Amino acid sequence: MCLEATGATKIYGKTTVLQNVSMNVFRGEIHGLVGRNGAGKSTLVGGITGLVTLDHGQVVLDGVKLEPGDPEFALNAGIALVPQQMSSFPTLSVGENLLVGRLPMGKHGLVNWTQVWELAETSLKLVGLDVNPRVPMASLGVASRQMIAIAQALSRSAKLIILDEPTAALAKPEISRLFKLMRNLADAGVAIIYISHHLQEVFSITDRVTVLRDGLSRGTFQTSEISSDDLIREMGASSALTKRARKSQTHHSSMDFHKDNVLLEVKDLSKENAFSKISLTIHSGEIVGLTGLEGCGKHELVQTLFGLQKASGGTTNFGGSSKVVQRPREAISRGMGYLSQDRRGESVFEQFNVADNLTMTVLDRLQNKWGFQFPSKAEKVAKNAISTYSIICTGPEQNVGTLSGGNQQKVALGKMLESGPSLLLLEEPTQGVDIAAKASITTIVAEACERGAGVLLVSDEIETLLQVTDRVIVLYKGEQIAEFDTEDLDGETLIRAIEGIDA
Amino acid sequence: MKKTIWINRLVDHLIWIVLTLTIVVVALTIDGFFQFNNLSNVLLHGTVLGLLSIAAAMALIGGEMDLSLGVNMGFVGYLVAWISLGKGDVGSGWNLNPILAGLIGVGVGVGIGWVNGSLVTRLKMNSFLVTLGTLIVLGGLTYVINQARTLNGINPVLLVLGGEKTFGVPNSVILTAFAFGIAVIISRFTSGGRRLYAVGSNAVAARAAGIDPGAVKRRMFMVAGGVAGVAGLLIIGELGSAPANVGQGVIFEVFAATVIGGVSLTGGRGSYFDVLGGVLLLSMIANALNLTAIDPFWVEPIRGFIILFAVFLDSQRESLRMWLLKHATSTNQSGSEAA
């Protein structure tokens, strides 16, 4: 036995994100760790690496009990994490990246660079990477950097290597290179925990797999003895995934009313290294869902539609022009509104008050014919908007930074809707908001649809997609692999498509 | 692969090519540039600028900024002159031993660095604003010490570093060259020096690698402050007196030399060897403008334009690198990953 984690429990405030989870990993084993977003994978890994202090439970590595919440102790004990978001020193050489904090010293207490390059070359050879250790890290591609992170773990002679979504940024040949390396390491006695959303990969590389759901362990299975259907069921056939009746009947009738009115038509839109040949149509009054795993290209697609990123090919037809939108300003003037998934960074002005945020997009409308703007008018517009979008705040003067996440999101939505867009691009609008706010955000969107707007809703939440959309488009590694009519769609089918398992 | 390394080196040390070209142009167009006395003047200009640039580069490599270095130097120089002056002069009347006074001065420089570093790392204050604050405080305090009067009659021992020569070479030039040598060695060959680069490149990753970014930065600010203090001892020797406004405004030229020398304003990249190139370039330009019969009022604007041009060249560095690498790899088809 290499790693033994028992009774791992973590509670944040009122929510238990990890409850009494136990997991053991053998030497020489590749152990899959799967679960949907929020299942508790990251927390469990945090507990093992000491980056998260567990409330209960303990972690034992090769008979040594680890200090809770002490990442350095775990590192020295032989646990190495290769994080999803690579953290490295871009300005420093590859060799120094590998050996940072423990450069070999020569006689006079000076760094022995000859030895640095030699050690680095040995480590790089171990992962089969043909790179000169003297070049700066920034000059390498994502795949090489991933391999270097693994090489770093190896050069620390790690007993347990945890790989968090290592294939998210890799192409097929790189993935097979990585898998070969993982198998070689396992054969040499290293234990590997492999976290992935890509179930196909989990089936092809792991020996056993542990499933988490809602902070609970669903058990550990022999990979060869469990079918993909069973695994998916363990991951999340919760009540949330059973199809529910659509909320708003009026929404339906209005949709039929606008059925023939095509708002946006996208043909063969491509962007290198992000997505290729995407074609979709959005009608007036329609909500189209867009989903897929992290890195599938959905975020890039929406940003390209809005002009924040450049397309490399294809056409879009929107707002009476067949030109692909080049910049956000143009997108807005042609009638698009975009709600970013990065609420704090891109959607609201946290230092501004509610009124200033809500009127941001309509400043021109607020000024009189001499170009002056009176606060009273802005306040009136803001008060109106506050009640329309049921924003819970002390008044138009409250700073948006002090609002709850859900109400910030309503402000962001309101700000966008005030300018009267005909096409809404919404990224994860209900992410991290409470149930009440979720309901009113859904209502706001539904009402915009009734007025004839079309919506492209990017979401990871299966439940939300099933409840509010008319159609769902699924991307997998940049390809449009499925389009469903929500009417006859169930959660399991959707998850299978998202995970890239052919139905 | 070899070729790409060579191109990377060339682009990294671009300043030395620019410097060589400038020397050729200046030597061909301006009479009297290549005389021993004049070259000595160029180097003299580069002493104080050089020491302060080492300190400024240090801060930038660590991902922070230190604007207070120039006035730190001025404050230390003035303070040292004042505490070592006897009664009857305009000094303190303490008549302190000049060597002790010098040591105290460098200590004060380190102390100023400690204050900067503590405010930045412990209280998480922005280093640009913190050091802007200490810049103003110290500039004012220098005037407070003795009603802004210039101090004359400084103890001759204190003038040895900045005012005298050994074998015909000014001591300050020797000291500065020495300082650059030490800086290159520390930055390339000691674990402490490498840690500073790691912290400046990515403080989060540095912490994950078992480095304490706060401690590294505090030490960095203290060393930088100490170096500025040493520059304070040089400047009073070079001037032969201690004016209260010495060191005010020099920080702009210091930053120009540092950036022209290829130090990244975002941290983690820079070489002291190239900073020396930047210092020599600016010293030479200042000298050349003095030698020409240009209207003295035009010297400053012209200097400014030249600095802007040098910074422009620096900003084109990465495009140049890409361009060269592309051409090199398209000719030998190595297709290496570094390209």
Image (spheres, coloured by chain):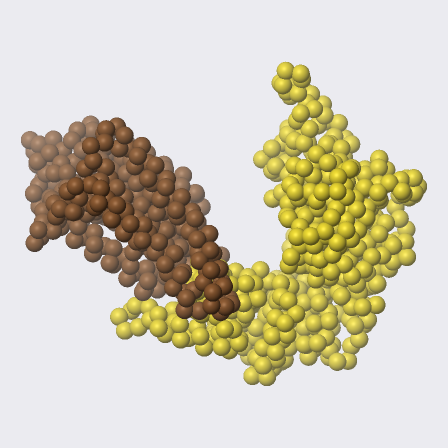
- Which residue sits at x=79%, y=72%? A228
Residue A50 in view in this figure:
no
Q: Colour of chain B?
A: brown
Q: Which residue is nearer to you in this view: A156 or A321? A: A321
Residue A503 seen in this snapshot: yes
Between B66 and A1, the residue placed more toward the observer is B66
Residue B330 placed where, x, y %?
49, 63
* Left or right: where A115 falls relative to A447: left
Q: Residue at x 49, y 77 (%)?
A: A125
Front residue of A344 and A127: A127
Horizontal side of residue B220 vs B91, given as left or right: right
Residue A199 in which image quadrant: bottom right
The vertical placement of A231 against B289, above or below, is below
The location of residue B294, given as percent across then percent down, is 23, 31
Q: Find chain A in the image and tell me its colour.
A: yellow
Residue A379, image quadrant: top right
Residue A155 relative to residue B277: left or right? right
